[in-house]
Amino acid sequence: MILHRRSGSTVQGKRMQRFKPGRIWTDDRNRPINAHGGGILYRTGTRTYYWFGEHKNEDGAELRFGEPSSPTEPADGGAHVYSSQDLYAWHDEGLALPVVRDDPAHDLARGCVFERPKVVRSPATGLYVMWFKLFRRGAGYEVCHTGTAVAASPAGPYRYHGKFLAGQSEAGAGDFALFQDDDGRTFHFCSRKPTHEVYAAELQDDCLAPRRPYVRVIAGDNFEAPAVFKRHGKYYMMGSHCTGWEPNPARCAVAEAPLGRWREIGNPCLGEGRERTFDAQVTYVLPVAGRPDAFVFLADRWRPECPAQGRYVWLPIAFEGEQPVVRWINEWDLGWFEGREAEGRRQEAEGRRQEAGGRRQKAGGRGG
Ligand code: DGJ
């Protein structure tokens, strides 16, 4: 396929060492990475990242209002997983949870809408638990189930566990984030249908269901694509508005506790393209392992008519005071965080020098 050969992000056999937002990103088999609406799991022991996302079928098209937009393949093939040690080069681990092709009555029957898989490890059972959005085959877009699946090893295979309607809503909930706190508590943040306010609940120890009823954490409606992370003891949520596959301005909220009061602090994107999140929609915020202050904004450039050709927009998050800021960069690598840290340290040292100079002048003045 021409698009594969035109890839600017890798040369066959050569490992990619930079992020190139919006460009074709190929795996170790030189195929475009197929993991849309994804999220990352990091295993400390093996220092390995696992990228889970929607496998989009070649020749597939997204449904519109529950109907195919063209008489083609359904878009969704299940959850695809890739592994990496450096975040640039990804090894294809295959389908972690494929849709079911031989049983039309199965919840995951081919033709279902399977979106935004995210995986956490239950600290209690040691098992890997995948959550995903699930619209049953032929059932339209009104009711969105939350599905779960379990595996003994990170790349799977995952066994389907079941589905439920999240957020105490008969219509369930759509886009979501799973967030695991430093103390091992895991939370589900979801965009509750039909108003798309954000509701959240702490999960049971096995991470398979909420422990208690959901509470509303963001009252502003039409909040989609929540992605939660923690920095300096504060909790941040990136997200979007609700405009189907069309890009819209990103949004951001902050709280002192996962189920506490969340305060919206505006669009984190700055510069040209900020009103359309650089033509993308956030899916996850990745804390870079071993770099305490380094977070990456992971977003999707959707292509609903040919979803397998959707692209990824990964950008570093800067902090201006406590405000997260995302700017477009054509190409970058993790050294960006060192550069920024180095700049911070330079400014700090400069400040200290000026302070010391001021003190010396004062002391000199008094002596004279
Ligand atoms: C935006 C959501 O974030 C996506 O996951 C997908 O559900 C589309 N809407 C469907 O319109």
Image (cartoon, grey):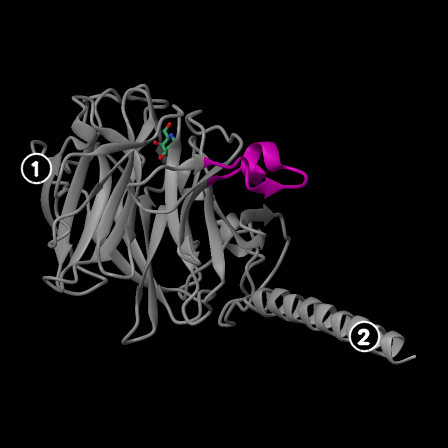
Measured as percent of width and height from the top left, residue 306 is found at 43, 35
Camera-side residue of 368 and 51: 368
Residue type at mark 1 is: Asp
Image coordinates of residue 176 in percent, x first then y, are 30, 39
- Tell me the residue at 11%/47% (across/down): 160
Q: Position of residue 227 (x, y in %)?
A: 38, 45
**Residue 258 position (above or below residue 85):** above
The amino acid marked with disc number 2 is Gly
Name the residue at 39% across, 37% down: 262
Give the quarter of the image for residue 72: top left
Residue at point 42%, 31% (across, down) = 304
Q: Which residues are magenta?
A: 264-281
Quadrant for the C terminus in the image:
bottom right
Q: Are marks 1 and 2 in contact (CB under 8 Å)?
A: no
Q: Which mark is residue 103?
A: 1
Figure label count? 2
